[in-house]
Image (spheres, rainbow, N blue to C red):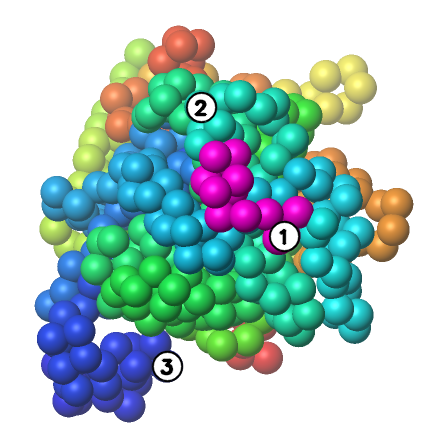
Amino acid sequence: MNLENNEKNLDFIRLRVKEDKESKKNDGRVHTRFPPEPNGYLHLGHAKSICLNFGISKEFDGLCNLRLDDTNPIAEKIEYAEAIKQDVKWLGFNWGDRLFHASDYFDQLFEWANILIRDGKAFVCDLNFEEMRKLRGSLTTPGENSPFRERSIEENLDLFGKMKSGEFPDGSKTLRAKIDMASPNLNLRDPVIYRIIHKEHPKTGDTWKIYPSYDFAHGQSDSIEGITHSLCTLEFEHHRPLYDWFCKNLGIHHPQQIEFARLNLTYVVMSKRKMLRLVEEGHVSGWDDPRMPTLQGMRRRGFSPQSILDFSERVGVAKRENVIEVELLEHCLRQDLNKRAQRRLGVLNPLKLTIENYPEGQSEEIDAVNNPEDPNAGSRKVPFSRNIYIDRNDFMEDPPKKYFRLAPGKEVRLKYAYYVTCKEVIKDKDGEVLEIICNYDPESRGGDTSDGRKVKGTIQWVDAETAIPTKVRLYDRLFSVPNPEDVSDGVDFIDNINPDSLNTIELCLTETSLGDIEVGLPFQLERIGYFCKDPDSDSESQLILNRTVALRDSWGKLNKS
Ligand code: ATP
Ligand code: MG
């Protein structure tokens, strides 16, 4: 990137990084990291952080590490760690040989805890969490010292050693930094830095019975890796003085933490804890349910990495909490799809149409353009014959004025094929339309007439003989209100779930070329929306399509009005 030209567009983080680089802070190095905790799948908010960290390292000739912050074996799983790596790669970022784990530093962190004890800056506390909370005070009242705060250095060293060797049960003791119980910043009121957890760790097995707290591990891991700019979300702003305290008192490299606002989206819940509930309580089919804002869910839905990168860039970085409208995400998605997605024909509610003057037993192949936005996408052959299906919504027996689709006596253009005129409507005894009988104009192949008559309506169709029976899943927003997490007492965000977020149509018909479409590769069903093949298709030996997004760009409209 050309920094000179783009200076005006630099966000506050990039400006800071640029300044530091120019003033040769850290010898002019730029080194960032993306540090997820492997306790769930990555979501769109993480993608923003990934783009920011990897993006900045690229723009400033720096490096970016991937670090799994695995300090809590109770919530963390190998499954999550693997998915995280897969997702970062899918977005197109590369950590080279710099994949690290906070657990790589357990020995060092333990050593540093002992140094703090020896310096009289940490103590073993016997209070349980409830008792600790009571003595902690509040934003308006100072806390009180723990009765165990004045233990001797020898006793602390001895007890901490015994905690490590597993002599005490979970929760019976903690190691706490000795800072200031009257500090206006609650994070500095003798925070817990080690907890006893008798649980096997995915990386270190049963070596450890004590684990560092997030706060004790996070900043020091950054320090060990020589990170220059630790980018994190706003909720860690008040933890910064604590990280600084650790670095200062341990005399180690001091990364600069810079906070930015989390990505929040309307109609979306984006916290791993809440998403876990959606999965565990069966509100969605899994972490990769196409309605989830997880990268795995979005991929299954048909999002490309490019659309997510584009979105991240557009939302930028802000210093204050804000909520982005989900329409912006959909807009980025549509823009990307419109360029990339090939067009195909399909009908969601099939209605039989017979072309009476088309010879029985005959069929032909019609040329259909793959993507009008992309001249290189070419065209394909689509079979056409006497028996086709159109969409039930494209026919009205008794239409209003200015109805341009099919109706008794009316003529429409079958996309890429011929003009047909409705001659007869066949109904069952309840009056339901079973079949339409038409005549076609053999001169109108490809949509042109010799006499220049005007036909306003164009509808999609599929050939009866070769069409593929298809199950279609129409997804809508998972929540029905813009701020699903904004709930008053006694109300649960789960109550805000949209009961119509998934509407499955069991028997649709799609053109035969979709038989070998790649899973996850989006295409446009003309006039209907963007879709992609779901991985369940293979296990159910049936073509199953997920709707990626409807065609209409409501965001664009909103912004024009
Ligand atoms: P959650 O609240 O969903 O569990 P988290 O912040 O606990 O998320 P981590 O695994 O700790 O998840 O996050 C890894 C990195 O991603 C952190 O640096 C965090 O600041 C960033 N991050 C997480 N959520 C968002 C978000 N919504 N917007 C931007 N960055 C985020
Ligand atoms: Mg977290």
> Residue shown at 33%/71% (left/top)?
256
The residue that disc 1 covers is 149
Secondary structure category for the residue under label 2: loop
Depth check, mark 3 against mark 2: the one in front is 2
Crowd class of label 1 (few under 14; some 14 to 19; many from 20; radius 10 Å): some
The residue that disc 3 covers is 12
Q: Is residue 365 left or right of residue 87?
A: left
Question: Where 4 falls versus 425 (above or below)?
Answer: below
Q: Is residue 53 visible?
A: no
Question: Where 8 falls versus 425 (above or below)?
Answer: below
The residue that disc 2 covers is 165
CB under 8 Å between discs 2 and 1: no
Segment colored magenta: 148-160
Residue type beneath disc 2:
Ser
> How many angstroms separate mark 2 from mark 1 (CA)?
22 Å
> Residue shown at 49%/77% (left/top)?
319
Residue 201, position as x, y percentages in the image: 41, 24
